[in-house]
C-alpha cells in the first residue's frame, strides 16, 4: 500500500478528482496548503509597500491506495493536473505499513480501494 | 419621486411640495428671509436626512455584492462600489444634474436636457428659499446625486467576478453621466414621459430598471463566469452554483438597503408631508407616513413570498433568496409607494418575492449569469412595480394627481414608460459594453478570473491570513 | 413609550404629545388642512425617523446573535432574524395593532384588546391629523409594528444553534401576534396596568422582558446545546464555552442596537419635544433631549460596569461581556429614560452592567444555555430597569405625570407590572414551546446540531470556501 | 462647529443659530413655554439626530481599525473602541463639558475652562429653551460628548497591535478628559483662538488634529510593530506590509464614518438652517444644505484623488488607499464645510486624497508605523483642511462672519490655530505616553505581540473556529 | 517509529484526543481536511441550483509514536472515533526513519513518547 | 528521497523558510495545524467560563528532498526554529519511494532539488 501525496493547482481540484474517479480511486483527503517552488513570487501591494509572496496556494491530495493502483492514480493526477507551466506541482509516493478502517477496524487490503 | 420641476411657477411648487398646507404658501418673487417658513426648514431637513439614508445604500450594495460572491474577488467589488459613489457624485455635479433637470433649458425639448456644466444656485438667493422648491437648491442637488450613483452601482453586482476594473469604471461614468440623467429627465425633469402621464414615484423604472438594463447588457456581453455552467457526462448542461463567501455580509447589505430605502422612498416625497387627509379616501396618500408603511410592508411581504417560494422550489429555505425577496418587495413598491393602499402593498410585495425567486432560477436556465440577482431584483421587479401602479394605484388619488398634472399612471402609461426606458437604456449599455470589449477588452483573463480579481486588479487580498478553500 | 391612547379626548392628546406647547393646540373635531401645524409635521417626522432607527436594530440583533454563535449556524440565525422582521410587521398589520391599541373596542375591558383585522385609518381623514394624535395613524402603526418585531427577535438568540426553523417561526408568529400585543395593551393600550400607575417609558418590561420571558421558556424547553455542559473525570459538571465565531459581527450588532435605541427610546417620546422646562426641576423631563442623554449615559455606564466586573471575575476583560454591558445599560434605562436624572442614569447603567455579567455566569451555573445572553440582557436587566423607575425616578416629575394620568411608577406599581408580565408571558411561551415540542418537535437531531443547522435547515453554508475548525 | 457660546447675550445666540430667521427671535430672559418655537424644536431635533450619526462613527472606527489590522488583534481593537465610547461620554459628563464650554467661568481666562464637575442645566429651566441656545442644554451636552469621544478613538488605530490595554485606557481617559476640552475651549468655548479669528467649523483641527497628534506621539513612543521594518540581505531597510485581515470590515468602517459625518459636519451647523440666502454670494453659506454638499463632494473627490495616486504610485489601485481617500476628503473639508464653494470642495478633497496616499507612504519611510493611517488621515489632512480655509473660504462670507465675531480664517489665523494645537496636544500626549511607558509599561511583550493581543489581553479569539495563516 | 495518520469525524475530535491521552499518547498534530469516501454526497442548494458536495469535513491526526505505541494508539482512535456508519474514516501507518526534537536537536526514541 | 515533516512555531515560519533557502532547499509545502505536546494548555475565557486550550497553532512544513539534503535541511530547520522553550516542535523524516513532477511527468532524483 502506498500513500500518494500530490500538490496540484487549486483550479485543477475538480479535474483531478474526476480524473481519479475514472480510474476508480474514490477515497482521498484534500487540504489547502501553500507551497514554494519554481513559480515566481507574486507582488502584492498594500498601503504603498510591496511584498513579494513566494508561497502559492495549492491543493494537497492524500490518497492511500493498493500498490496496483499507484500507477494509474499517478497518471490520472498528471493528466488532469498538468498545464505545462512552472508550478504544476508534484507527486510523492510514500509506503504505508498498515491501513485500518475505523468503522469496523478492518485491516489492510480489504479496507482500501 | 415626484419632484418639483424647477421651472414651474412658484405657485405649483407650493402646491406640490406643501400640498396640504396652504398656510405655508410664500409669495413668489420675494426672496430673502421673510419667506423661509419653519415648514420649509423641516422639509429641507428631511430631504437631507434622506440623502444620508440613500448614501448608506451604497454600503448596502457593497456588502450584499461582496457577500454573494467569492472571497477572491472581494477587494475588487468593494473597490468598484467605493469608486462608483465618487464617480456618481462628481459626474452628477459636472453634467448630470443639469442634464436631468434642465428647467426650461432643454437641448431637445422634453427629450434631451441641458448640457450646462457644473451646479450652482441662482444668483438671486432664491435657490435657498421656497422660491426654488420645497427645499434648497443644494438639498435638491445632493439628494438627486445620491440617487444617480445608485443606478450605476446596480450594474456592478451583475458583472462581478469577471469584468476588468478600468473599463467598468469607464462604463459607469458614461452610464451615470449620460444615460441615467437623460431617461430621468423624461419624467422627473418634466419631459415627455411626464406629459404622457407616466407615474414613477421613486424610481422603480427610472433608477432600478435603468440599472437593471445596464446589468442585463453587461451579463450578455461578458458571458458567464468560468465554471458556472458545465456540460456533464451525459452532455447536458448543468448549473453549478458558485457560493457566496459571506452570508453575514449579504444580510448586512440587505438590511442597510432597506434602512436606506426609508430615505429613498420617504425622501422622494420631497417634503415631510405627513399625508394629505383630503385625498380621495382620507388615506394619507402622498405623505411620508404612508410611504414608510407601504415600503416596509412590501419588503416584509417580499421576504415571505421569496421564503415560501424558495422553500417549495428548492426544498429548503434559501437565505439569499429571502434577502433578495426583501429587495424585490422594496423595488416593487418604489414606483407607487405613495399612491397604493397598504393591502395592495402586501400583494405587490408578495408577488415581487415570488417573482424574484423564479426569475433568478429562470435567468440561470437562460445561462445569464448574474452572481447577485441584480437583474431579477432591479429590472424584473422594477418593471413589475411600475406596472403594478397601473393595476393597484388608488383611483381617486390618481385622478387627483392628474388634476395637478403629475401623472395618471394607467397601465398603458406605465407600459410606455417601461418600454421607452428599455429601448434606450439597454441598447446604450450594450453599445458601451461592446465598444469597450472590442477596444480595451472587458473581461479579465482566464488565469486572473481563476486566481481572483483581487490579485489581478489590485494585487491585494481581502482576508489577509485566512485560507480560503477552492471550490470543491 | 408613553403613547397617546387613541380614545382619549383630543385635549389630553395634545397635553401629552405637545405638553409644553400650548400654542400648538388644535381644535378637536376639526379635520383637514387647517389644524396640521408645523409642529405636527416635525413630531410625525421624528416618529418616522425613529421607525427607521428601530428597524436597524433588527440588523443589530442578527449581527450580534450570529457573531456570538458558531459559524455552522450562521445562515440559520440570519434567516430567523430576516423572517421575524417580516412576520412581525405583517402580523402586526393583520392583528397585533388593534389587539394592542383597541381604543375603546376592548374585547375584555382593559385586559384583552380588539380582534378586528387589518389596519386602516379612520374614514374622516382624522388619522392624518392631530385629531388622531401628535402624529398620523400610519406613523403610529409603523413605529409600533417595528417595536413588536423586536420582542420576537429577542427570543431567537437564546434558542439559537438547536431549534428547528419551522417551529420557531410558528412560535414567533404566535408570540408576536398575540402575547406581545395583549401584554402591551395593559399599559400602552391604556389597560389595567396603566390604570394602576405602572410606568414603562419605552418597554423595559413590555418589550424586553416579554422577549426575555420567551427566551427563558425556550431555553428551558430546549435544553442546552450538545457539549456545553460536560461531566469531567471527577464526575463534576463543567461548563465548556462554545465560542462565538465572529467578534466583529458581535460588535457591529451592539453598536447598531445602540444606534437604533436612539429611535427606540427617543421615538417613544412620541414627539420631538425638546424637554419640558416647567417640569418639577426645570430638568427637561419627558423630552427627547434628556432621553438621548440618559440613554447614552446608561449604555456607557453599562460598558464600564460590565468591563470591570468581567475584568475582576474572569481575570481578563471579555469583549462579549462589555458589549452585553452596553445593551444591559440600554435595557435598564428604557423604562425610565424620560423621568430619571442623568446621575441616576449612570447608576442604573453601572448596576445593569454588573448584573448582566453575573447573570450570564449565574445562568450558566443553572445549566440554562443562552448562547448570546438574551435572558440576562433583556429579562434580567428589563426587570432591573423597570424596578429602577420605582427607586430613582424624579419625584416631582412622577407627581406631575400622575396628575396627567400617565403613571406613578412607585416600586409597588412597578413590581406588579413585572410580575403580571412574567405571569402571562412565561407560561404562554412555555405552552407554545411544549406543544410544538410534543407535536412537530422543537429540536433538531443530534447529527444536525453537530453538523450545523446551516446544512440541516438550509442546505447552505455561511462562509463558502472558508474552512472552519471544529471545536478543539 | 461654530457653537453658541453660552455666555453670549441671547441676542447674539439667536443671531448665530437662527441667523436668517429673525422671526424666530425670542425675548431673552423669558422662560417657559412661550418662547419655544417650532423652529427651536426642529433645530434641537437635528442636533440630536446628528448625535446619533456621530455615535455610529464609533462603529466606523472600530470596523475600519480592525479591518486594517491582523486577525489576532481584533478583539483588542474592538474592545478599545467600545471602552472609549464609554470613557468619552462619562468623562465628558464629569469634567469635559465644563472644561470646554466654561461660559464665563474660566479658570484662566480664555485659556483654561471651568473645573466644575458634572453636567446640569440651569435651575431656571432656561436650559430647555432658546434662552440657552438654538437647542437645549442636554442636546448640546450629548452632541459635544459624542464629538469628544471621537478624538480619543482616533489614537487607537495608530497604536494598535502593540499597546497594552490598561495603559491605553488610562491615556484615553486623560486625553479626552483634559487635553481635548482645553484645546477645544480656545475656539468653540470662546477662548483666545476664537478671539484671534481662527476658524474651524467642525473640527479639522480641534477634533481630528488633536486626535492625530495623540496618534503621532503614541507611534513614536511605542515604535513599530515587530516585523514591519526589516533589514534585508544587503543591509537595506525594507518595509514589509502587515496585511489587514478584512477589507469588508474596513469598507464598512469607512462608509459608516462618511454616514456619520453628515451628522458631524451637518450637526455642527447647530441648527437645521437650510442656508442663508443673504450671504455675500447668495450661496447658502452656513446652512445644512451646503454643508451636506461640500462634505459629500470632498469625500468623493478624496476617493478619486487617492485612487489615481495609488494607481500611479503602486501600479495597482489599492482599496485601503481609496478608503483612506474618502476619509481624507472628509477631514479636509471639515474645517470649512460651511464657508467653501462646491468647486473648491472638489479641490480640497482631491488634494486631500493625493496627500493622504503620499503621507501614508512617507510616514512608512520615516519608520512611523501607523497600521490604519490615522496620522495621515486625521493629522495631515486635518492640518490641510484647516489651512485650506485660509486659502479657499469665500471672502464675502468670511467678512460677514467677521462682523458677527465668529472667525476670519485668514491663512495666518489658521496657521496659528494649527501650531497652537500641535504645541499643546503633541507634548501632552508624549508626556502621558512616556510616563506610562516608564511606570506600568506601554507595550506588550514580544511573545504577546506575536501571539496576538486577543490572547494576551483578553484570553479570547475573534474568530473562534477559523484558522488564520501566519504571515507568510 | 511510525507516523499514524488518522482521518476522523470532526465531532469526534475531542473524544479521540481524550482516548489517546488515556493510552499516554499526548503529542500529535491536528488539521481539518475534506475527504471523499463511501459517505454519500450532500446536496447543497444555493440560489435555486443544487450542488452535490462529495467531500466531507474531516479532522486529520498525525501522530508520531514509537513502535510499541502503534497498536494502542490505533485502538484508541478506533474506540473513540467509531460510530459504525459510513464515513467513520481511516487510519494509515507510515514508517518514520528519523525523528528530531527542534528544542534541543535530540534524536529518535528519546524524543518521542 | 525523504519527506521531511516539520512542525514549527508560527512566528518562525519566515525564518525557517529563509534558513532552508540558504541551504538551497526551495521547494516545500506549508500548512497551518494545531498541535499538542509539552507546551502547557492556554486558558481562554469566554463569557464567564474558562476553557483550557491544549492545542497550539503550529506551522507544518513538508519538504521532499534527496537523501543528501536531509541533514542540512534538518539542521536549517533546527537553527531557525529553535527558541529553547517547550513547544519548539518536531521534525520527522519519512521515506519516499517515488517522486514525480506533474508538469512533465519526470521522475525521481532529477525532479527534486
Ligand atoms: N520538494 C518538494 N516538497 C514539497 N512540495 C513540493 C516539492 N517540490 C515541489 N513541490 C510542490 O510542487 C509545486 C510545484 O513545484 P514547482 O517547482 O514550482 O513546479 P514545476 O516543477 O512544475 O516548475 C510547488 O509549489 C509545491 O507545491
Ligand atoms: N484511501 C484513502 N485515502 C485517504 N483518505 C481516506 C482513504 N480512505 C478513507 N479515507 C478517509 O476516511 C473517510 C471515511 O472513509 P469512507 O470510505 O467514507 O468510510 P467507511 O469506510 O467508514 O465507510 C473518508 O472520508 C476519508 O476521510
Ligand atoms: N509525536 C508527535 N506527533 C506529531 N507532532 C508532534 C509530535 N511530537 C511533537 N510534535 C509537535 O511538536 C510540537 C512541540 O512539541 P512539544 O513536546 O510541545 O515541544 P518540546 O519537545 O520542544 O517541549 C508539538 O506541539 C507538535 O507540534
Image (cartoon, coloured by chain):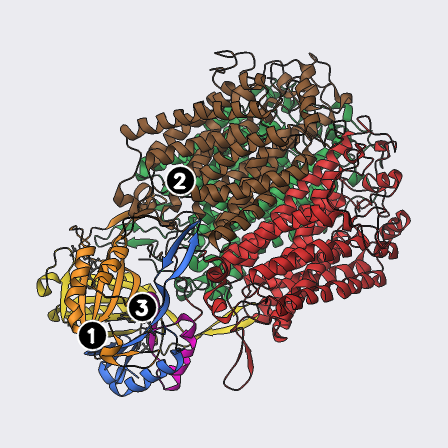
Chain colours: A orange, B brown, C red, D green, E blue, F yellow
Is the residue C374 above or below the residue A64 in the image? above
The crowding category of the residue bearing disc 2, from other C-alpha atoms within 10 Å (few below 14, some 14 to 19, many at least 20), is: many
Q: Which residue is mark 1?
A: F93
**In-front residue for pair A40/B471:** B471
Q: Residue at x 89, y 47 (%)?
A: C404
Q: Secondary structure at mark 1?
A: strand
Residue D159 seen: no
Subunit of mark 3? E
Q: Find residue B399 and report its image quarter.
A: top right
User: Which region of the structure is painted magenta?
Assistant: E5-34
Q: Which residue is mark 2?
A: D359
Seen from this angle, which residue lies furthest bottom? Answer: E68
Is the residue A8 above or below the residue E61 in the image? above
Tags 2 and 3 touching, CB below 8 Å: no
Tags 2 and 1 touching, CB below 8 Å: no
Within 8 Å: ligand 2 and the Cβ of disc 3? yes
Q: Is residue E6 magenta?
A: yes
Q: Is residue D259 magenta?
A: no
Residue at mark 2 to residue at mark 1: CA–CA distance = 50 Å
**In-front residue for pair D417/C248:** C248
Describe residue E74's horizontal placement relative to residue F2 as left or right. right
Which mark is nearer the camera, 2 or 3? Answer: 3
The verdict on a common chain for dots 1 and 3 is no
* Residue E37: assigned label: 3
Amino acid at each position: 500500500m502506498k500513500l500518494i501525496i500530490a500538490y496540484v493547482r487549486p483550479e485543477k481540484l475538480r479535474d483531478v478528482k474526476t480524473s481519479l474517479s475514472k480510474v476508480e480511486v474514490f477515497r482521498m483527503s484534500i487540504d489547502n496548503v501553500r507551497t514554494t517552488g519554481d513559480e515566481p513570487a507574486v507582488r502584492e501591494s498594500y498601503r504603498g509597500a510591496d511584498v513579494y509572496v513566494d508561497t502559492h496556494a495549492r491543493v494537497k491530495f492524500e490518497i492511500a491506495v493498493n500498490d496496483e493502483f499507484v500507477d494509474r492514480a499517478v497518471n490520472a493526477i498528471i493528466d488532469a493536473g498538468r498545464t505545462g507551466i512552472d508550478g504544476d506541482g508534484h507527486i510523492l509516493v510514500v509506503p504505508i505499513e498498515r491501513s485500518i478502517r475505523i468503522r469496523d477496524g478492518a485491516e489492510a487490503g480489504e479496507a482500501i480501494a | 419621486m415626484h419632484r418639483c420641476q424647477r421651472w414651474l411657477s412658484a405657485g405649483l411648487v407650493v402646491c406640490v411640495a406643501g400640498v396640504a398646507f396652504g398656510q405655508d404658501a410664500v409669495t413668489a418673487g420675494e426672496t430673502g428671509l421673510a419667506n423661509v417658513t419653519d415648514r420649509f426648514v423641516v422639509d429641507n431637513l428631511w430631504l437631507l436626512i434622506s440623502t444620508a439614508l440613500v448614501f448608506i445604500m451604497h454600503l448596502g450594495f457593497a456588502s450584499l455584492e461582496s457577500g454573494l460572491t467569492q472571497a477572491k474577488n472581494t477587494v475588487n467589488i468593494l473597490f468598484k462600489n467605493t469608486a462608483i459613489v465618487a464617480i456618481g457624485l462628481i459626474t452628477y455635479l459636472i453634467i448630470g444634474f443639469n442634464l436631468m433637470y434642465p428647467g426650461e433649458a432643454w437641448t431637445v425639448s422634453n427629450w434631451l436636457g441641458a448640457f450646462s456644466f457644473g451646479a450652482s444656485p441662482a444668483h438671486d438667493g432664491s435657490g435657498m428659499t421656497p422660491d426654488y422648491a420645497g427645499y434648497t437648491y443644494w438639498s435638491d442637488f445632493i439628494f438627486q446625486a445620491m440617487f444617480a450613483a445608485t443606478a450605476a452601482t446596480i450594474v456592478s453586482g451583475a458583472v462581478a467576478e469577471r469584468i476588468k476594473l478600468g473599463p467598468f469604471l469607464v462604463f459607469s461614468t458614461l452610464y451615470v453621466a449620460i444615460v441615467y440623467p437623460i431617461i430621468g429627465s423624461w419624467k422627473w425633469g418634466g419631459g415627455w414621459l411626464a406629459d404622457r402621464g407616466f407615474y414613477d414615484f421613486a424610481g422603480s423604472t427610472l433608477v432600478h430598471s435603468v440599472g437593471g438594463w445596464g446589468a442585463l447588457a453587461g451579463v450578455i456581453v461578458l458571458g458567464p463566469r468560468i465554471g458556472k455552467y458545465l456540460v456533464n457526462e451525459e452532455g447536458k448542461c448543468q448549473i453549478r452554483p458558485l457560493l457566496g463567501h459571506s452570508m453575514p455580509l449579504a444580510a448586512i447589505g440587505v438590511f442597510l438597503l432597506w434602512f436606506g430605502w426609508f430615505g429613498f422612498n420617504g425622501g422622494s416625497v420631497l417634503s415631510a408631508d405627513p399625508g394629505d387627509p383630503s385625498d380621495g379616501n382620507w388615506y394619507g396618500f402622498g405623505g411620508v407616513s404612508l410611504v414608510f408603511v407601504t415600503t416596509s410592508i412590501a419588503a416584509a411581504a417580499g421576504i415571505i413570498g421569496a421564503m415560501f417560494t424558495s422553500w417549495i422550489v428548492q426544498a429548503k429555505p434559501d437565505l439569499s433568496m429571502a434577502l433578495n425577496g426583501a429587495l424585490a418587495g422594496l423595488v416593487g413598491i418604489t414606483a407607487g409607494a405613495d399612491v397604493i393602499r397598504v393591502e395592495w402593498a402586501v400583494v405587490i410585495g408578495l408577488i415581487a418575492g415570488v417573482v424574484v425567486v423564479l426569475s433568478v432560477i429562470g435567468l440561470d436556465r437562460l445561462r445569464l449569469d448574474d452572481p447577485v440577482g441584480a437583474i431579477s431584483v432591479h429590472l424584473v421587479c422594477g418593471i413589475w412595480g411600475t406596472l403594478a401602479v397601473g393595476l393597484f394605484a388608488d383611483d381617486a388619488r390618481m385622478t387627483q394627481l392628474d388634476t395637478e398634472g403629475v401623472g395618471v399612471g394607467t397601465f398603458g402609461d406605465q407600459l410606455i414608460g417601461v418600454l421607452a426606458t428599455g429601448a434606450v437604456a439597454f441598447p446604450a449599455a450594450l453599445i458601451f459594453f461592446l465598444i469597450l470589449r472590442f477596444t480595451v477588452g472587458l473581461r479579465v483573463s482566464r488565469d486572473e478570473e481563476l486566481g481572483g480579481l483581487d490579485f489581478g486588479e489590485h494585487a491585494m487580498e481581502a482576508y489577509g491570513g485566512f485560507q480560503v478553500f477552492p471550490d470543491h
